[in-house]
Image (tube, rainbow, N blue to C red):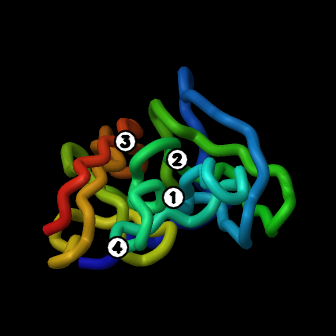
């Protein structure tokens, strides 16, 4: 399998979603996983399961970008709750932070050396309930 192919225009937060607002630290597309770089820039950057820092791997603030933005532009990030992800998913399947920056993947795509961060569980063929869980464990 591969990372979810997300149509940015179809990535929409659901009722009761927790949304934070901040600033993009690089070019980000709606539907990408991002983390808040609290130690260096204070901006949202693409998350990555095999990044050098724990923050980028999902320890701390992580979420799904709800809009596209370039460095320095405003960014809305959903950190919890239901989201129509803009891709086809399998109901009941757990999805993870991908080793591809910003990507969402099934467990089969998490490779040796990648850190395991749960994104959430699909509640239908188009929605995921976001519930980020950083394990701190590499495969």
Q: Of the residues under marks 1 and 2, which one precedes in the sequence?
A: 1
Cα–Cα span, label 4 and label 2: 17 Å
Position of residue 39 in the picture relative to residue 69 (left or right): left
Which type of secondary structure does the marked residue at label 1 adopt? Answer: strand
Res 63 label? 2
At 24% across and 64% down in the image, what residue appears? 106
Check disc 1 and report the residue beneath it.
33
Query: Residue furthest toward the top?
Result: 16
**Circle nearer the viewer, 1 or 4:** 4
Position of residue 132 in the picture relative to residue 62 (left or right): left
Cα–Cα span, label 3 and label 4: 16 Å
Res 50 label? 4
Which type of secondary structure does the marked residue at label 3 adopt? Answer: strand
Q: How many C-alpha atoms fall within 10 Å of the one at disc 4: few (<14), some, or many (≥20)? A: many
Cα–Cα span, label 3 and label 1: 11 Å
Residue 135: where, in percent of width, then height? 23, 48
Check disc 3 and report the residue beneath it.
132
At 30% across and 57% down in the image, what residue appears? 96
Could you tell me if residue 12 is visible in this image?
Answer: yes
């Amino acid at each position: 399998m591969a990372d979810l192919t997300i149509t940015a225009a179809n990535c929409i937060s659901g009722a009761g979603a927790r949304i934070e607002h901040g600033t993009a630290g690089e070019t980000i597309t709606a539907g990408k996983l991002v983390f808040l770089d609290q130690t260096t820039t204070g901006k949202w950057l693409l998350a990555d399961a095999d990044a050098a820092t724990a923050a980028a791997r999902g320890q701390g603030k992580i979420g799904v970008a709800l809009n596209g933005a370039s460095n320095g532009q405003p960014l809305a990030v959903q950190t919890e709750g239901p989201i129509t992800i803009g891709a086809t998913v399998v109901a009941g399947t757990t999805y993870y932070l991908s080793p591809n920056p910003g990507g969402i993947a099934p467990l089969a795509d998490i490779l040796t050396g990648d850190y395991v961060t749960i994104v959430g569980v699909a509640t239908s063929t188009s929605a995921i309930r976001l519930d980020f869980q950083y394990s701190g464990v590499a495969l």
